[in-house]
Amino acid sequence: MGNWVEGSGPLAGVRVLEIALLAPDSVGMHLADLGAEVIKIEEPARPDYVRTTGGPHIDGLSVLHWHWNRGKRSLGLDLRSPEGRAVFAELVTVSDVVIEGLRAGALARMGFPIDRLLELNPMVVFASVSGYGSTGPYATAPAHGVAFDAYAGLVPPVAGPDEFVSLGLGATDIGTHAGGLYGALGIVAALLQARARGRGAAVEIAQADAAAGWAFSRIEASRARRDGLLAPRAPAGSSVPAADLDMSEAVRYQYYATLDGHLLVMASERVFWHNLCAAVDRLDLYERWPGAEVAEHARGNRELRRELAAIFATRTTAAWIDFGIAHNVPIAPVHHPDGPVDDPHFAARTHWSTPTAGPATIATPLRFSDGLPSPATAPTPGQHTDDVLRSALGYDDARLGALRSAGTIA
């Protein structure tokens, strides 16, 4: 299963209706990657503006669009009109999943609360993916992107040379990416539940909750410290509670410069530390600073850090990776923000889409023995309107023409 296998995917035959903007698009992407038919419903006059915002642009469109909307079919449908809502109701009856990737309650405000969806299709799974969820004091607050990581304490302010503070380089959009994964996982679980008990289900995911869940070690340690369950932080040079994740003073778990780049050494277990020292013929370092059995970072030991810096500066990063494999020492390459495109392991493991238009995108990292479909190109607004309504609802030319003349479909 190490190599990519072309197949239909485990969600083949599952039809998903997606009404989403920006990062919640990633929920449908994960399902499409696994073989589901994902129909992206877009307002004809105002389609998903992820196409024109966020990150670099390729062929005039955002990389976020190329990635998050890949493999979907776009249906231009005006849900603000009675005719458009009638078409949507018909689609619900022949679909397995409805995704609301807007502010919580958006579909209910359009006349489709969960009870109405279940009336139309008693087996449907409804998934709400929003910033802050449907409850709590922030439920109606507008937000996106880094807001959820800031909420979870993942991107504290960085002081600048003047009176301003800034986001810095730590803004990684964990909440938006984790929210998509949690959303897809929840939908698959709800589908299994619905089929087991014979009735539909609903699942909710807030991107802020996802970011907080991702940051569990910091947050849970903070709660334990507040409750008096966690020992105070130890001074530099000794073992510290796991809650203290500032690694700037770590030595045996740290970045080091090489002849041509950087590496991360992770000799925090005594066995790995011994292996490293023995392999570079410096057992004197091990004998002088054996450290704890596990989780030993030798924080604040500047003398040892200088010794290791001199050692790692003698070889290339690739040579040190080979060294680590040969001598059982955890050593990893450190890539620049553009990513590991030229890394040999990345090249061996990563499957890219083969689009008919637009850029290639990185496919899901999941591997299934029966294979997955290769990701298709992200759609243009309303690209599949006629195809979807013909195949899903059996509309003929006359019905399509009438809807198009009324401005209901694009």
Image (tube, grey):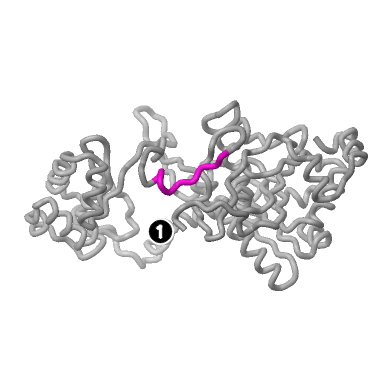
Q: What's the residue at 55%, 42% (across, down)?
A: 353
Q: In which quarter of the image is the C terminus?
A: top right
In the displayed structure, 263 sits above or below 205; it is above
What is the residue that sits farthest to the left in this orientation? 284
* Left or right of 16 on screen, residue 277: left
Total count of labels? 1
Q: Label 1's element?
A: helix
Q: What's the residue at 72%, 54% (across, down)?
A: 15
Magenta stretch, residue numbers = 346-354
Q: Assess whether residue 351 is covered by the magenta stretch.
A: yes
Q: Assess whether residue 53 is covered by the magenta stretch.
A: no
Q: What's the residue at 15%, 59% (across, down)?
A: 274
Residue 341 spot, x, y in % from top left: 41, 38
Instruction: Bin the neighbour count of mark 1 within 10 Å (Cα to Cα): few under 14, some 14-19, many 20 and up.
Output: some
Asked whether 204 or 319 is in front, the reply is 319
In the displayed structure, 219 sits above or below 407; it is below
Residue 331 spot, x, y in % from top left: 27, 50
Residue 176 spot, x, y in % from top left: 54, 46
Label 1 belongs to which residue?
217
Quadrant housing residue 286: bottom left
Q: Can residue 138 be seen in this view?
A: no
Residue 362 spot, x, y in % from top left: 51, 43
Look at label 1 and name its amino acid: Ser
